Image (spheres, rainbow, N blue to C red):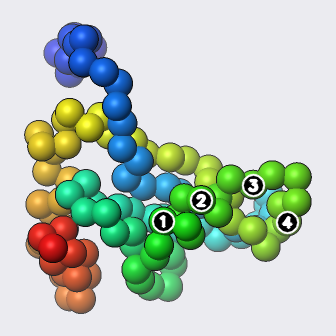
Amino acid sequence: LDEVCEPPDESPANYRLFATLAHRGSIDAGTFTFYLSPLRSDRWYKFDRHNFARADKQEAVDQLFGGPNCSDDDSLAVMLFYVKKCKVSRLDCDGGALQLPGNLDIIGNACNS
């Protein structure tokens, strides 16, 4: 693993949440929704099996916590994606968005605003 892993550094472990994966439905049936916030943007986008659209942080993060009053109609976060803040400039996570086909280029354009 030494070939692909960087040595530990002494910088603070400050991370930025840039995506969440949510599930809605019962344990044996339901649907997944992916929320993405491009690393150089503070906007959120929602992707599901039918389309994509802008979302707000409330929908993409804050409402995915579950809890005792949770039902099958509520979406729950099943995976959270973080990136270390000091590494954002080294990643090309947003560069690919500029090359997305069709009307998905709205995401790439949002990164530049």
In the image, what residue type sits under mark 1? Lys
- Kindly identify which numbered label has been placed on residue 66: 3
- C-alpha gap between disc 4 and disc 1: 21 Å
Q: Residues within 10 Å of mark 4 (few under 14, many from 20)?
A: few
Q: Amino acid at mark 3?
A: Gly
SS assignment at label 2: helix
Q: Residue 77 vs residue 11: left or right?
A: right
Query: Can you identify the residue that label 1 sits on?
Result: 57
- Pointer 4 or 1: first along the chain: 1
In the rendered image, the quadrant that contains the C terminus is bottom left
Counting residues from the start of the chain, the first of labels 4 and 3 encountered is: 3
Foreground: disc 4 or disc 2: 2
The spot of residue 75 in percent (x, y) is: 68, 65
Residue at 36% across / 44% down in the picture? 16
Q: Which residue is mark 2?
A: 62
When the figure is inspected, residue 54 is found, relative to residue 58, above or below; the finding is below
Comparing marks 4 and 1, which lies closer to the viewer? 1
Image depth: mark 1 or mark 3 in front: 1
Q: Position of residue 74 (x, y in %)?
A: 75, 68
Mark 2–mark 1 distance (CA, rounded to whole Å): 7 Å
Residue position for label 4: 71
